[in-house]
Image (cartoon, rainbow, N blue to C red):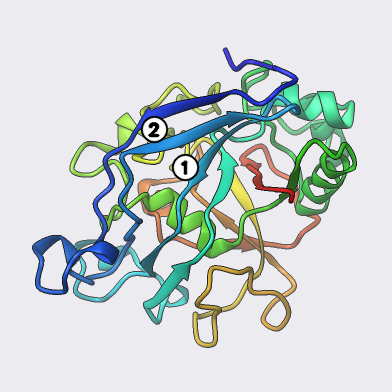
Amino acid sequence: MRPRDTVLRLTLVTSAVACALALPPHHSAARQDGGGCATPASAVTSVTAPSGIELVYVPPGRFLMGVEKRRADSRSRTPDELPVHKVTIRRGFHIGKYEVTQAQWKAVMGATAARQRDKANPSWRMAGEGDDYPVYYVNWDEAQEFIHRLNSRADGFTYRLPSEAEWEYACRAGSTDAFASQPGPLDAMGWWNDNSGGQAHPVGQKRPNAFGLYDMHGNVWEWCQDNYHESYVGAPKDGSAWLGGGSTNRVMRGGSWDYDSRHLRSANRESLPPHTRGNHIGFRVVAVARP
């Protein structure tokens, strides 16, 4: 399904993304009412790295992070989504087109999803097994080890987890709604407790967002680089990870197959200690081209 080429392959994916950044303030599409605003682009570049991980280029831009009280989805917001603040992504980046799969994890780490489960508790249940399923039962520390091993290959990219701001920007892909799927149904874009049948699913089966990213809503929670903070007071405005201070917990985004739709919102934030494993927790990577 996803090529494992040992050379970079470039393809163009059409993506119409509206953006207030290039529009005058009075333009109807330039309303700053909370949510995302991505640089307009007629195409998004998709790359398959030597690691076999498909990456999508996310262009620079700006967006409003968090949810304002007057937005339709404000009833679902939590205090840690405030204050709404403008974030400017000055440099584009590549991010995984899909969540890291079980095949990719095994190729780098030599462990199956079942082995990951056994590290936590052999009696805990699996939530779907197969090469194209997202890997889960992966804690934040192990995600960092996976990234370290990728970087040791020196394949032309420097890999890392996304910052929380990069994740929300990539998830929204220009959307200012609760879900990037709107005005369409969430079911078209994500696996959650209303449609998952009680388990995760192979990546890429739902509709992608406007950047060409799959499963940003649901399937498995995704670790971010940041320490968790109880509000956005003092948060970086340049898209970088917010490290130090706050909690020792690490941020997770996106919701999962066993959570309700409120947790799948683009702005929703969750956190857990970095040693936590679960059959609903995985990750995707960011990759920056090396000079």
Q: Which mark is residue 208?
A: 2
Q: Position of residue 144 (x, y in %)?
A: 81, 51
Point 24% across, 51% down: residue: 18
Is residue 2 visible in the rendered image? The answer is yes
The quadrant of the image that shows the N terminus is: top right
Please state if 136 lies on the left or on the right of 169 as rendered. right
Looking at the picture, how far across and down is residue 176, in whole percent?
A: 27, 58
Residue with the mark numbered 1: 216
Residue at image location 30% in from the left, 51% down from the top? 40
Q: Amino acid at mark 2?
A: Pro
Q: Nearer the viewer, residue 16 or 260?
A: 16
Residue at the spot x=31%, y=63% of the render? 35
Q: Secondary structure at mark 1?
A: loop
Q: Quadrant of residue 44?
A: top left
Q: Position of residue 57 (x, y in %)?
A: 51, 42
Q: Is residue 198 above or below residue 178?
A: above
Q: Is 145 positioned to the left or the right of 264 in the image?
A: right
Q: Tell me how many marks there are.
A: 2
